[in-house]
Image (spheres, grey):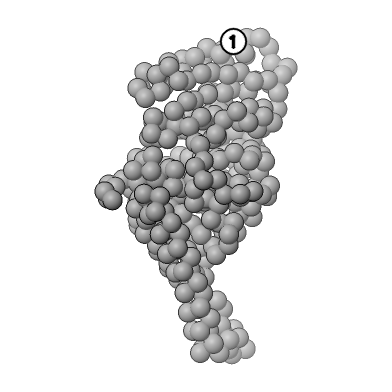
Amino acid sequence: MTQPTAEPILIPLDGSDMSEFAIPYAATVAAALDAPALVTRIVERMRWTSTGAGYLIAPGEYAELMELATQDARTQTQRVAEGLRVRGVAARPLVEEALSPAALIEIQRRERVALVVMATHARTGFARTALGSVADQLVREGSCPTLLLRARGRLPEQPALERALIPLDGSALSELALTELERVAGRLVKRVTLARVIDAEARGGASREAAHALEATRQRVERDIAQLRGQVETLLLWGPPAQQILEESARHDLILMATHGEGGAARWAFGSVASEVASETLKPLLLVRPQQRQG
């Protein structure tokens, strides 16, 4: 197997079957980008003493419990890494002991990770993901974009990620998604819809201005990204933004959008819109925010 030279794709696991829902998607992304996979699990340190109360867990018992947890983590990450190698993806297991799964942020930076691919619980948004609140933390504080996948049903063998819906709102912030598009275009994403949602009560002039802006963006994307020439369409939608994005995503494989980042889900590029999309979508959602390193 030729060793890829690209920065790695990080796959966080937590010991559950649900967290492994991300694996086929990570394999698809890694193969398309010729990137290695870093299969990671954090073993959280347990409290074993209490101020003024002595031991909560005897030192010997604590060490035994940590060893069992570490061995379980090694078994899962090694199994998943081997499965990825069978698919033709260079993969490395990584198990680290830390105070919380938020240590994934440091691993991102240290390993120069290009993308995080992880599963979330069904219909609970970011606050209750496979790794607790860590997905929200990765989106807000991480050094790279995050691809979130709703864990449901059977694991797909070869998931499609070719048709991307990119919601824009006319701001430079929302167009950060186009920077990430440039990295994955042609290799992963092959067709794109640039969408703008207009208030149903907006005047006709607003629609014309939005249509002109979308067309200008389409021309720029096709000029700058040769792999997408002739493969970019524009779409105006009317109504509640999140609802329209969710409905339109039914004919796409992937939603790619920018987030505000620092203020959490409530202060994303589209205010509460991105938060609602994240909570409700059944489609893969690729999020990028300002200050994240764009490869």
Q: Quadrant of the C terminus?
A: top left
Q: Position of residue 267 (x, y in %)?
A: 59, 40
Q: Position of residue 221 (x, y in %)?
A: 41, 22
Identified at 61% across, 18% down, the residue is: 236
Does residue 60 show up? yes
Reading the image, the residue beneath label 1 is 208
Q: Characterize the local packing of mark 1: few (<14), some (14-19) or many (20 or more) Cα atoms within 10 angstroms.
A: few
Q: Which residue is nearer to you in this view: 116 or 103?
A: 116
Q: Position of residue 159 (x, y in %)?
A: 51, 41
Q: Is residue 208 above or below residue 57?
A: above
Using residue 96 as the reference point, say whether residue 1 is left or right of it: left
Please tell me whether mark 1 sits on a helix, a strand or a loop. Answer: helix
- Looking at the rendered structure, the kind of residue marked 1 is Arg
Q: Is residue 283 above or below residue 77?
A: above
Using residue 35 as the reference point, say whether residue 287 is left or right of it: right
Q: Which residue is nearer to you in this view: 174 or 161?
A: 161
Q: Position of residue 19 (x, y in %)?
A: 55, 56
Identified at 51% across, 29% down, the residue is: 163
Locate residue 111: give its quadrant: bottom left
Does residue 114 show up? no
Q: Which residue is nearer to you in this view: 227 or 97?
A: 227
Q: How many marks can you see?
A: 1
Q: Is residue 105 above or below residue 173?
A: below
Identified at 26% across, 48% down, the residue is: 2
Identified at 46% across, 47% down, the residue is: 26
